[in-house]
Image: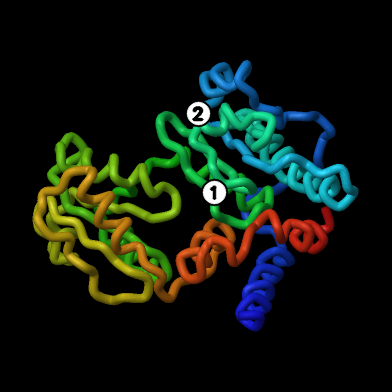
Amino acid sequence: MKIACWLLAGFYLFFCCRAEEGLDFPTYDGKDRVFDLNEKNYKQALKKYDVLCLLFHEPVGSDKVSQKQFQMTEMVLELAAQVLETKGFGFGFVDSKKDAKLAKKLGLDEEGSLYIFKEERMIEFDGELAADVLAEFLLDLLEDPVEIINSKLELQAFDHIEDEIKLIGYFKGEDSEHYKAFEEAAEHFQPSIKFFATFDKGVAKKLALKLNEVDFYEPFMDEPVHIPDKPYTEEELVEFVKEHKRATLRKLRPEDMFETWVSMQGREAFSPLKSLNEKQICSGS
């Protein structure tokens, strides 16, 4: 077990120390954007922001180590909030002791977790707690939950996605009730699992898909699984994905690395907040 933990720590530090990619992050401008959420302001915050990100944390200890760790956590959120300020994102803290009633009301139950509220959905972020990773994850939530494939070139791009779970369905069009059920199911897993759809008969033929049929692909598996009993309801699709989203050989990605680890070893094995010191030391924050 100790060897496994060290191996995981090695993977974790690899991601922490990698050169930043994607978003170009500025330096912190000194403006406080992350706020303390409480029973007086939470309704206003939910209305004000399109997406609200809440860190549910244990009370900060009086010792210097605890305070330093919390300051580093706060800086990650402040940087993400600074970059996403104009895009309708809000960031807040919920103290598990001081705001216990609010936490229960919102469904927050795991200290050290980052919860994201978008419309009527609550999403738990299971990625590396780094500003760039978090910001890119959040921006993905603004994209359409289903990507449409209607050409050979787009189909080739779909085929090249080998290291992630993906689903694809064939439907009459965007107004189809069966497509709408598929789209609503996709929202439950966005942005962690990719959902695709086609309205093109030629593309569907190449994929051996019948009308209103959905295929489920596991990572690095050439042949998909046909989801049985088409057409499907939203609930049936969600249930199938949850049942079949098992731990398989897959790429360890910063945006969901802890979810992947948890599915293999159990949630208590590794916590992103417990390893934040290593992350901040590597990034130089």
Residue 190, given in percent of the width and then of the height, sits at: 41, 47
Around disc 2, counting alpha carbons within 10 Å, would you say few (fewer than 14), some (14 to 19), or many (20 or more)? Answer: few
Residue located beneath label 2 in the image: 105
Q: Nearer the viewer, residue 14 or 99?
A: 99
The residue depicted at 13 percent of the width and 44 percent of the height is 172
Front disc: 2 or 1: 2
- Amino acid type indicated by mark 2: Lys
Q: Position of residue 56 (x, y in %)?
A: 62, 40
Residue 163 occupies quadrant: bottom left
Image vertical order of residue 68 relative to residue 206, above or below: above
Chosen colour scheme: rainbow
Indicate the quadrant where residue 85 lies.
top right
Identify the secondary structure beneath mark 2: helix
Q: Is residue 227 visible?
A: yes
SS at mark 1? strand
Q: Is residue 165 above or below residue 95?
A: below
Instruction: Quickly name the residue at label 1.
Output: 125
| Image coordinates for residue 206, horizontal then vertical, percent | 17, 66
**Residue displayed at 65% across by 27% down:** 37
Residue at the limit of the structure toward the right, as seen here: 64
Location of the N terminus by quadrant is: bottom right
Amino acid on which disc 1 is placed: Phe
CA–CA distance in space, label 2 to label 1: 19 Å
What label sits on residue 8 in the rendered view? none
